[in-house]
Amino acid sequence: MFRAGVVVLFFAIAGIPSAMRAQMGDPANGPTKIPIEQLDVASSPDALTLESSVHTPLTEQYIWTKEDAVREVPSADKGWLRDAGEDLGSHYFRRTFPLSQVPAEAELYVAGPRAATIYVNGQKVGQYQLDLSFPMGMRVYACDVAKALQEGTNVVAIEAVRGPQVGSGADNRLAVQQTRGEVMVVKIVPAALGVVAAPLLISDANWKASMQFIPGWQAAGFDDHSWGAADSLGAIEGSYEFFQWNADAGLYAWPGYDGISPFLGHYTLKPTSVRNVYNGAGEIAHPEVLKEIGEEFQVTLPAARVSSENAPSILLDFGREVAGRVEFESDSDAPMDVTVQYGESEMEALRDPYLGVDPVHVAPHATAYGPKSAFRYAVVRFVGGKQMRFKAIGLDGIAYPVNYQGYFNSSDKELNLMWAIGAYTAHLCMQDDIWDAPKRDRGRWMGDLDVSGRTIEDAFGGNFLMDDTLNRLLGTDPVRSDVNGIPGYSAFWLTGEKEYYLHTGSMKQLEKTHKRMVQLLNYMEREMDSRNLFADENHAWTFVDWSPELSGDTPETRMATQFEFYAAFKDGAYLLRQMHDDANAEKFEAEAQRLKSAAQQYLLDGSGTFGDRWQTNAYAVLSGVATNTQYPAIWKNVLASVGHIKYNAMIITPYYNYYVVSAMAKMGHRQAALNWIRQYWGGMTDEGATSFWEGYDPAWYKGIDFHASLQADNMSGYRVSLAHGWSSGVTPWLMEQVIGIRSMGPAMSTVNIRPDLLDLSWAEGGEPTPRGLLTVSIHKKNGYETVVSLPPGTTANVSVPVSTATASVEVNGQPMSVRSAEGGKRALLVLNGPRRFTILSK
């Protein structure tokens, strides 16, 4: 928050003490390892306090001029965009309101515009202009208006310029207008700065608005009857569309604002360590008490305010990546001012925090918060208050309530840790819908969900957020564009929808999307050329991976998108048949076949591969475009090099690496895939990861400033996320390829179970179904002992390892007739639940 006459917005980031040592990725200390059961503090709904039980949503509304508001329905050719560029002209707002008694104190708050001039009863009471180099979009401005108010009729008049645009993939009117900066929220509170109280005035549809300058418009007696009503988007906490894309990050300073969906929960976490204690010009007393409950923490300053360079400061380490906000609980009779800067790594917090250095005003005996984000470290500077006393400074964690129903354990503790970190990474992304990441972008991206959705289904089961995120990603009827504006993400919406249906069997959710699903498939058909090759005919953003030649319209992105489209048309046809829409199913099955035939005719090269890239060939295999007879060439010429190139210019993110290791497994190279997993995801855990990173390569720089070397999203450095849902693919891979569970029918009514120990001595895991937990364990015991527990209504096609095609197989102590498979290395049998089966094979 910033206030008229008080400069508290920006502070220099202090230097890094030479004695500092990172807890994460520091070669001197080694990686930080957290026991699995302690990794996710919010691993049970019982650990959370629901937002709906502790917070009443605020009623003040986002408003703007109707002439410049985003249209209700996107245009067919330009979507939500306008013909013109940014409008930086003035917008004028007025509101008349009565007041029976003038309060002793009154603060006016405004947020949204990049610049504003504020008048009360014709008197200028405040003016500001944002520094646009600051990383936040919307920020809160406050000014004292007590002396300008009067008994009887009062008039507030504001001249505003639209706020800075926040980069986003917003796909609905509310979020598009908010992220474009075309919103303003106002209220007057009869209390001192930062104190929460019932407002005297709020912004709503009763305000008048105009884009036309008229002399004297700000005067109390100005006749505004010709002005129209302001356009209202609704209450600022009235839709969780307003909580996406970091658009509301700066509203942490708005009195009473949470910006947290009612279905989310809170938990409290103390820092595991308090380091880099710097007394500056003041004195910090016993900083270690911040790790304890019920101990007062004190800081003494030599004056009411000190410069940031001289301010006492501390570094809080919460021991793991967390999603939430730092909470300050005052035990002081006077107001206090601090700044907070977050970092997913220690170096980000100290050098270049993603959300900048954020001022927090803490009212007497009140609780204040920093911005919502994801981080592990927080630098806190104590800049104002002289005698500063806090009951607590800690984390207010924000999480979606889940139960860890699924599990994985094996003889390899590192793999067990990877499974847990993958599940935790996906859980961190379950916020106000399922996001790519809780730091950046804090929004819905379908490519991310195609991976993280599998993790969520395996670890937590079906839930409201999966249903809602898929529905909102598809957009409104009629479908006018690709999902997220990316053709491949349209394809992944269909493959992701199928996975969701196979796990949950939700016909209600499927039918809700039926009409729009057909519209999307028809739209995708228009992206093909006369040869049935993907040609970007709709001029979208073609994207496959953050890797050279795989982002933007290139031959590689077109080829990989062709394969993604083939999978999508197949899966779309399957879903349509489930809804008995046979006519459309036949249409899109035929389209899928045309895509496959075209790929074989035009995209297969002379070496028998689809180019030389891992990503492209992997999806050719996974989608089914590549035939079994083409596997040897693809393996020999392309995928055999996975894990054997130390310095690989053609980088691959954890996102597409999931498809690569899945393709390797499908081709029969599971051990090679597991070796690469140990290098790649294991490399992150060896460097101290407590959640999986957006971009990674085992050859990149390791050490105290590892974060600066990470690359993704066409950038490198601290903006790269250290908790990204698309990086959680190791978790579903272990369930699919080691435990061996794959759903083949709605609601897991039919499953394939093919456990494979590879180089392990034992493994066990469970996956939730709508009718109970399905569990599998396999041990080497004079052959193999496989134990399968099936819930009611599940039929399992089980494949167990055998030494020869004629080897005996017993089920629950009785000989079992089986079929031989995989060249005599596997025996196939069919089991029906509910029952527990012990299978002995030699």
Image (cartoon, rainbow, N blue to C red):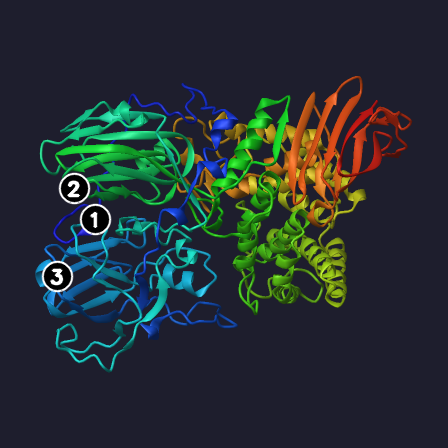
- Type of amino acid at the residue the image marks with label 2: Pro
Between 687 and 384, the residue placed more toward the observer is 384
Give x and y (percent) for residue 555: 62, 54
Q: Residues within 10 Å of mark 3 (few under 14, many from 20)?
A: some
Nearer the N terminus, badge 3 or badge 2? 3
**Does dot 2 land on a helix, a strand or a loop?**
loop
Q: Residues within 10 Å of mark 1 (few under 14, many from 20)?
A: many
Residue annotated with mark 3: 125
- Type of amino acid at the residue the image marks with label 1: Gly
Marks 2 and 1, Cα distance to the nearest angstrom? 9 Å
Q: Can residue 704 be seen in this view?
A: yes
Residue annotated with mark 2: 335
Residue 118's label in the rendered image is: none
Nearer the N terminus, badge 1 or badge 3? 3
**Does dot 3 land on a helix, a strand or a loop?**
strand
The answer to whether the residue labelled 2 contacts the one labelled 1, judged by CB atoms less than 8 Å apart, is: yes
Residue annotated with mark 1: 194
